[in-house]
Image (tube, rainbow, N blue to C red):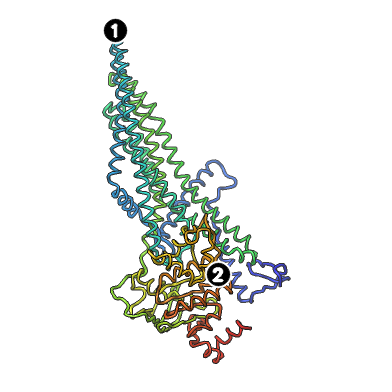
Amino acid sequence: MSRADSTVDTAGGLSAPGGVSLLPDELAAESARTWDAVTQAPAVPDELRPPESASPGERVSALHRRHLLRERRAQEFVADTMNARTGLPIADNRRVVRFIGELLSQERLLVVAVVVANALAATAGLLVPRLLGELVDSTVADVQAGRVDAALAGANSAALVVAGLVLVQSAFTLAAKFSSTVLGQSVLASAREYIVRAILRLPLSRVESASSGDLVTRVTRDVGTMSESVRWALPEAIIASITVVLTLVAMVSNSPMLSVPSIVLMGLALFQVRRYLLRAGKGYLTEGGTYSRINTTLTETVEGARTVEALGLAGRRLRRGDDDIEVSGQAERYTMTLRNLLFVVMDIAFSLPRVLVLLLGAIGYAEGWATLGQITTAILYTEALWGPFDMLVHTVDRVQVGIASTTRLLGIATVPPDREAGEDRPTGPELVGTDLRYAYRAEHDVLHGIDLDLSTGERLAIVGPSGSGKSTLGRLLSGIHGPRTGSVTVGGVELTSLPLDQLRTEVALVTQEHHVFIGSVRDNVVLAREGSTDEQVREALRAVDALHWVERLPDGLDTKLGSGHQVLTPGRAQQIALARLILADPHTIVLDEATSLIDPRTARHLEGSMNALLTGRTVVAIAHRLHTAHDADRIAVVIDGRVAELGSHGELVARDGEYAALWRAWTS
């Protein structure tokens, strides 16, 4: 039947003309229930939608209710993520503060340089208003006494001093900007290195339980946001804080009375800032979570594009994407409301002090409590105070966004290791699996008591239908996962108790997944064993039948690969991955359909070349091409998580069981 001859029913299943499902009735019904369950609950509850018709008062009340509901959703999201047993968690605020403190402690000299340079620049700048205030008082006194020439001379002298202070301030400001830039870049480099190390330490089992969109969002958007905060917002916050503190000190020393309006309004503004900071963190964490959700949906849709097209699921996937965007929009509305409330208070606090200082100054001057010079200085200090304070609030907002992203990134580092290295070391290369059981979900084993004892140099093929547990068994035999019960030992030592660097010299896993890193061909191959010579690299490439095409590349081993450079086909990229394996030289190799992305002719030739090289090593080959099984010493047929048959090709064909049926289907 052609694709044009089929339709998609309302359950999302494939149907023949007339609405007859191509799926078995029971499976079609289950598919329908699955889709119905997905679409039952709306992505955004109706309570978050504004009323279509209401009075202004009712609209304000509804807006307040929506804001409280968004706040509760943000709190629930953070609580769920903090307590997640699967996926990637987030760190708590104490860990973030400790992390930032450790980063700054590594750059103590730069921190001191930033503080001192900014303090000197601020001090030089604050001397100017004080000097101008004294000039006003002296000029008024000279004019009233008839000393006009003295007043002019004083003004000229003051102008020269002001010019000198401006030059000094400019020099200190330049030093402050330079030191803060260096500080930001140094701290950023240390932070990125820490995050990369944390990512590389992630247990593969936890990575697989997390959505790809979440991990991608953390290592892209969150790293970028953290970078902006560390590079720009953190130094600017230090600068603004120093300026605000010194300005307040100068303002009080000029006239305590005239500093009262600024101090009172700043205190009120800080109350709102504190209220904002208590809520914004959860809001920004929720935003980050919604971006992960969007990326996950996009990734799943792109990777499953053929399935989406074949089953006519484009409309459903588009609606799923629209729902994700709507959920993200609700999260952003919450943080936007918090910012708007903050900035309204800030605007009021920014505008009122000027008026209040002038009013209070006029009263003080009339009563003899303040001079014109003090009023002038107070006005200039008010202007000088609120600029840095406004900058401080804005940078604190950006720092808060950065802290939310840092919290998500540090959550990666909180994932506990899935193994602890022991003291025992293998006494030989024998690989033994005993009573192996494994479950991805509690009480749902996918392997059921498998026993395997591999002889040194043996080649074991593991075959079976899709979903039977072949790849899971391969991951247990290579030490990627630890079994729920039983053990996998090499030389009498549990695999998961070996340090990772030694484990990979004992047993190596090669899957159908591969990656080409940005760098030369040589760089990509020697990842397995640094310090390898060019001849060793060529031997590894020759073993996997890749040397002939590598030598035809523009620069041979020096040819740059990866994004923006030489593009390799999936088959050639897999050959590079296999060359790494050859160079790593483990005594046991687990091949999980390692040649599935290479065309059959190339794969057959490559496997033949590897056979000669792998003599003397233990090889476990998980394959869907049965010619690989034909060449193996023994074949394990895995059915529903159990080894149904075990023996050589001839023995199993003669037994006329599961393997014989697979072989007939393969060769027919």
Mark 1 is on which residue type? Gly
Mark 2 is on which residue type? Leu
Residue tagged 2? 597
In what element is the residue under mark 2?
Answer: loop
- Identified at 44% across, 67% down, the residue is 537
* Disc marking residue 301: none
Q: In which quarter of the image is residue 429?
A: bottom left
Residue 498 vs residue 331, the one in the foreground: 498
User: How busy is the neighbourhood of tag 2: few (under 14 within 10 Å), some, or many (20 plus)?
Assistant: some
Residue 107 vs residue 311, the one in the foreground: 107
In what element is the residue under mark 1?
Answer: loop
Q: Position of residue 273 (x, y in %)?
A: 38, 42
Looking at the figure, which quarter contains the C terminus? Answer: bottom right
Q: In which quarter of the image is residue 451?
A: bottom left
Above or below, 573 relative to 435: above
Q: Residue furthest top?
A: 146
* Disc marking residue 146: 1
Q: Which residue lies furthest to the bottom in this view?
A: 654
Answer with left or right where residue 309 lies relative to residue 130: right
Answer with left or right where residue 497 lies relative to residue 464: left
